[in-house]
Amino acid sequence: MTRVLLFRLAQATLVVALVVTACFALIRLAPGDPFFAALEQPDVPVEAAARMRAQFGYDRPIGEQYLRFLSGIARGDLGWSHSRARPVTEVLAQVVPNTLLLMGTALFVGLVLGVAVGAWQGWRAESRLARATDRLGVVLVSVPEFVLGLVMALLFAVVWRLLPIGGMRTEYGPSGIAGLFDVLRHLVLPAGTLAIVIAAIVARHQRAAMRAVRDAEFLRAARAMGIPERRIVLRYALRNALAPVLTVMGVLLASLASGAVLIERIFAWPGMGRALVDAVLYRDYPLVAGAVLVTSIGVVGATLLADLAVWWADPRARGRL
Amino acid sequence: MNPRLRLPVAVLATLALVAIAAPLLAPFDPAAQPDPINLALQAPGSTHLFGTDPYSRDVLSRVLFGARTSLGIAALAVTVALSFGVLVGALAALTGGRLDALLMRTTDAALAIPRLLLLLLIVAGTGPLPPALLALVLGATGWMTTARLVRQETRRLLATEHVRAAEALGIPPLRLWRAHILPGLVPTLTVAATIAFAAAVPLEAALSFLGLGVRPPDASWGNIILEAEGRIRSAWWLVLFPTLAIVTATLAANLLAERLATHDEDLRA
Amino acid sequence: MTIAALTVASLGVVTTGAIARTILSDVSFTLAPGSSVGLVGRSGSGKTSVGNALLGLLPRGLALTSGTRLHLGADDLTAMSPESLRAVRGRRLAMVFQEPLLALDPSMRIGRQLAAALEAHQVASGPEAVARAAQMLAKVGVGDRNAARRYPHELSGGMRQRVLLAMALLLEPDVLIADEPTTALDPTLQAQLLDMLDALRAESGTALLLISHDLDVVAERCERVLVLEGGRVVEEGSAAEVVQSRRRVPGPRRPVRATEQPLLVAEALSVEFPTADGTVRAVDEVFLTLRRGECLGIVGESGCGKTSLARALLGLTPIARGRVMFDNIDVHALDRAELRTLRRRMQLVPQDAGASLTPERTVDELLVEVLEVHDIARGAAALARAQALLTEVGLDPALGARRPGALSTGERQRVAIARALACEPALLISDEPVANVDADSREQLLVLLDRLRAERELALVIISHDLAAVGRLASRVAAMYLGRIVESSDDPGMLDAPRMPYTQLLRASLPTGRPVAGHERPSFAGDFPSPTALPSGCPFHPRCAHPLKNDQCRSERPELQQVAPDLPAHLAACWHVS
């Protein structure tokens, strides 16, 4: 078992290394000098530009820059974000928790909803209600998240005025426990939109898995032994149908990460996605690279955890990962 | 043709026809701004069936030409992704050993970054791109799933009795690939292409919506919606019609992919 | 008058869709307590639905007809509530399924699955249930201490089937339905399982309904036999009666003619595979020779290395030691291009011949391809030759335009043979030529192979676990066990009177259609040993019941030696043959 675990860790490390290199490539090899915009003012002397370049090591050979970059990451230094006039790490430290709150809530709600609905759909696949909801699910999967977000914003915030339209907090709003509720109110729409997207994906996989298990021979064998039906559904069928859903976790996390970018933009949620898009628009390469790096490492780590969960749930998967 | 496949194929074919015939079907020039002061943001009516945008451009024409752009980009992206994916996947499966490991680890690494983020990373470096290059970049970020699928299928086919038997009969490798392995890959490739298409359309729309994809005055379904930001209530037509278009295309492609996959399973059983 | 354990009257099953198809029609029989009835039929005869109908577990889309009467003892199964039916299942009426890997929950330990049955019927619970489950497992021979904690996929096929048996008989039901319980097993394991079933039944007084496609197996074990065809009972009677009426006369053996020079010589041939648990010797120091016009038969069960041997002889699998000489050429010393040229002259008809045909190509394309690749013919000439080949193997040339999926199993087997013959080989190896075909095709295929051997002067190698098939075709025979040749002879009569205990066991395990008397079969215990952990000494000794088995058997591996001075060509690897 440990052999397999070590192998997966090595794999993950390799992946992260490649991602790091890609981010470095962006920063250093992109056309245009990141200092150009900041220094495009007539009264800044040329020497100041040269000094700034030297300070950030932009005049050294590529190899050395790469090593400095790597050591910087190890020390937790991701460079300077010129669009926000702060170290990248500081910017990220501010926005990442907000994104985690959003993604975490969406993932949890989406998984629970998706598994429940999908399992029910798979078990009772012939009923009209199941087929209708299945069609709805197919449509939901095909609607882009940003459109769904816009529609949700339109309905709940503009038309019905039930929930706030954007942001994470009301300006000059309450603090303490009331402040917590305020955040939750702002969380509902963005997280809800993402949760629906997640649930739609999960439900489809769960449905397929449950359908496959439903007609499995070992269920008939269990019935032939006189095991009660309820136990058969919960213990025999569902347990075997959960593993396929866990394997799709990697896809889910990627969807979440992409979705977060768009949803944060629509709902003005102060998270990493929004910071990333702004950074791209401002050509703030260090911040772009930093954000992408952190996200990728997060996705890789979470996928690894998910694979371990599969390994636990399906004894057949042990020994080969 | 399997009757269950008829509907999605028909829908996609219609969309393709509309895209090709856009110049003939569009009532107005999609880039023309006849009267930005008085004719901007008109609700749908008899002259402008889909209304006008903030620059008084006709939305219907923009949606029609947007079909050209968006679908064209998606199709080109799929072609690039599939070609590269088949190359990588087949090479990995046929050579095995170190090259296989190297190719697969690279694929896994490329997959680790969520696709939208990868696109943002690239676009940050390149700046705004013309539609053709945008399609190329989309394709360059979308070959990984195909490569994995092709590698998996090729490996499975290599181990099948009929390929081993053909090998035992002395059939040389190139002929083996063409006559005994490739035909077995066709179902997988078709499904892969459909899935890739279904992923490319909303991705291009998202990029354009963020202002990083197709730039005006060129029309794309995504950048029409962009103009509705902040005005959702008052300019709902800017959201509705492009959305319907995107959803129709994506839905048809997803449905086709699913039914194709089921069709293959039934054949195999 | 005692009530029958099971009474089936006018059992009918139909499909419930738009068009009602009849699966079973008017099937009736009774099962006396403790007795046994066999149900024989081909696939599609509806026999599986009998078992499912009795348990009330017909799959979606099937239903009982209204005139059906099913009685378990004095109780009417068709009139029971779902809860009563559930209480009956497992407790009074149990079923053993065909594919143990599919019938066991892959995510639950086997001890737990057994205990669950006890708990569901409130016979025992908690630690007592676990203990009784372990007890039952020990009874069926899955007794190692950790067995109950294992998952199904960790056990071998034979052991899994025994677990299913344990589950079915755990609650000592009145009636046991066994649906093809041994089809996936080798003959020796098959016999062992059925013996165990008989022993357990005798203890608990359970009646048996045995469902199978194999008349010989059923007739050996059951007092009465019913034959099902197209959903109806077409024949019924005692086992002996039914066998008699359906028996076919086997054809005569053909004499063989041999030329002088051996075409194929294998010396100390060994094939090894590295696996996670160690190195497996699939083929271990095999010697054999073969001339043109001769047929060599190799008998053995799955896992004995016969397929690896076949592939090694043809150069398709690398060898670890020894050599293979074909027409005085060292097969494994050639490079890929030279080997491909040599392939023309030595061909393999693989075990699952149907699967060896690429489904997307037509038969003509497959045959023409071989001809073109080996530069024998092209274009129209090639097509003409392809049609001639089809005729030679007894097929209508018009079948050439079809794809393999449109042919029957027997036809596909013949196409595979035609394909192998396309390049005019001198050597043909056929792996399990008649394993998957029905009785009619079996006969025709054997006749075909014999004719081809004689007409084309082929050197023919037949590999099979079917001793009768091998005995018919081969002039020289050898038996393989765990990669070694353990017995060989120039007289195919060896198969009727083998000397080596394993070959004797193999012969005795094959169902003959006559009821088996306990003392006739050499008894034995255990499964095949793991190929990475071979026993010391004679590899067969743990399963051997020879009365003279001694310490030498356990410590020293016997080499092939003459069984008698007057039979110089009959060799056996056993310390106690001569």
Image (cartoon, coloured by chain):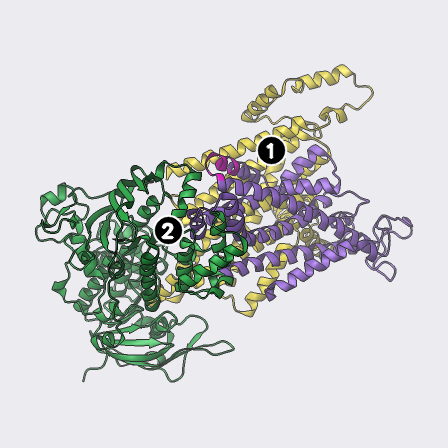
Chain colours: A yellow, B purple, C green
Residue corresponding to mark 1: A93
Asked if the residue under mark 2 is in contact with the one under mark 1, i.e. CB atoms within 8 Å, the reply is: no
Q: Residue C378's spot in the image, x, y percent?
A: 52, 52
- Between C23 and A214, which is closer to the camera in this rendering? C23
Magenta part of the protein: which range?
Answer: B95-104
Vertical comparison of A45 with C115: above or below: above
Q: Residue C384's spot in the image, x, y percent?
A: 50, 59
Which residue shows up at 55% across the image and 44% down it?
A: B147
Inspect the image, locate mark 1, and give the three-letter code of the amino acid beneath it: Ala
Magenta region's main secondary structure? helix
Q: Residue B253's spot in the image, x, y percent?
A: 64, 56
- The answer for which chain carries disc 2 is C
Q: Is B28 left, or right, of A304 in this rendering?
A: right
Q: Is residue B17 magenta?
A: no
Q: Quadrant of residue C187?
A: bottom left
Residue corresponding to mark 2: C348
**Residue most toward the front?**
C260
Inspect the image, locate mark 2, and give the three-letter code of the amino acid beneath it: Leu
Asked which secondary structure carries label 2, the reply is strand
- Between C505 and C438, which is closer to the camera in this rendering? C438
**How many other residues sit within 10 Å of disc 2, few (<14), some (14-19) or many (≥20)?**
many
What's the CA distance linking mark 1 and mark 2? Answer: 67 Å
**Residue most toward the top?**
A47
